Amino acid sequence: MSPLTPESIRASKANLPPIGSVITKLRRQDLYIQQEQHRYRSPRGFQHWANHLAFAAMIEATLQFIDELEDPIGFWAATTCRWARIVEAPPRFLAPELTEAFRRTPSPHLDEELPQVLPCFRLMLPDGALFTEDGVPIPVVIVADLRVMANWLPPMAHRISGISCVGLALDGSCYLTRHSFAQIGERQPTEEDMSHPAWQWDEQAVHSTNQRMEDLAINALLVQLYQPELLTTGPAAKMPSGKGFSAGSADDTGAVKPQGPVWIGKDFRLDRTTRAPSPGSPSGASASAPRRPHWRRGHWHTVLHGEKRQSRRMQWFQPVYVGLSSAN
């Protein structure tokens, strides 16, 4: 194989078929996609479920070339897509209002005490929720618990723990960040350049994209663990009739059984009521220099509960819109 250079990358991209044609071909020819495409139906405003499966299959297919490309980010993205397929990672549809609230809630630092009940899920984002630094939409983030993946990963990766977030952009590029458990507060996202030297990218811009992606993914994970009241399941789609739809594995007849979409925050509404700042807050500290109305960021706290308050859980405190006090 010839050395990977910027020139060879540009030449190879010029010879590649358009992404749209690859996705269409996969939907028509990939047996797994044909079986699974009717299991879920994406609500309006989200990437079509079958298109997501095709994008993930396209990324997974690059595993056979990863060693030659020496691309760690590509390896993790392809490996995570394969893991999501093997464990049948379910989609979770993040409602627009909750997406807006998560944008104003930085992801907290997590540790090994995080429950291992969600091995992997596909965070389906509403249209316009996340873009690359070049303005390309990222409609889906695959979120995986590396502790659960440990025995399935190559030996060199067994010591890695944390939450892996892989964003699949519509131009075929992948974004990777890992929320590490190795030490509380430690972060190891891809702003440390893991890519091949031939790739040209804006480190600061990619870091910004990764951080926005991680905030959405970690907040969505924590809500599922600690605030299940925000989860609702919609009605399942009707099974299409005709030939070619009975190759699944969900029931005795062999047909894929449609499942309703699970929403995160479908009925959630972000409270935009203007509140006066408290006297001790930065907003109310000085009457001579009042601040304009603004959003106070949301946050997660560990709270004690249960008998003798010996149990712990995390609780989300929503963003608050703070305005000028009545005295001003």
Image: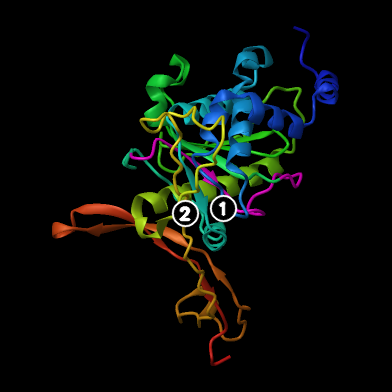
Q: Is residue 129 magenta?
A: yes
Start and end of the magenta stretch? 117-136
Is residue 285 something one can see in this rendering?
A: no
Is residue 135 something one can see in this rendering?
A: yes
Q: Is residue 166 above or below residue 238?
A: above
* Amino acid under disc 2: Trp
* Rendering coords of residue 305 (x, y %): 22, 59
Q: Quadrant of residue 214?
A: top right
* Horizontal side of residue 311 vs 28, given as left or right: left
Classify mark 1: helix, strand or loop: loop
Residue in the foreground of this view, choosing between 43 and 6: 43
* Rendering coords of residue 80 (x, y %): 52, 29
* Rendering coords of residue 133 (x, y %): 73, 45
Quadrant of the frame with the C terminus: bottom right
Q: Residue at x 60, y 53 (%)?
A: 126
- Residue 94 is marked as none
Q: Residue furthest left?
A: 308
Q: Which residue is mark 1?
A: 43
Quadrant of the frame with the N terminus: top right
Classify mark 2: helix, strand or loop: strand
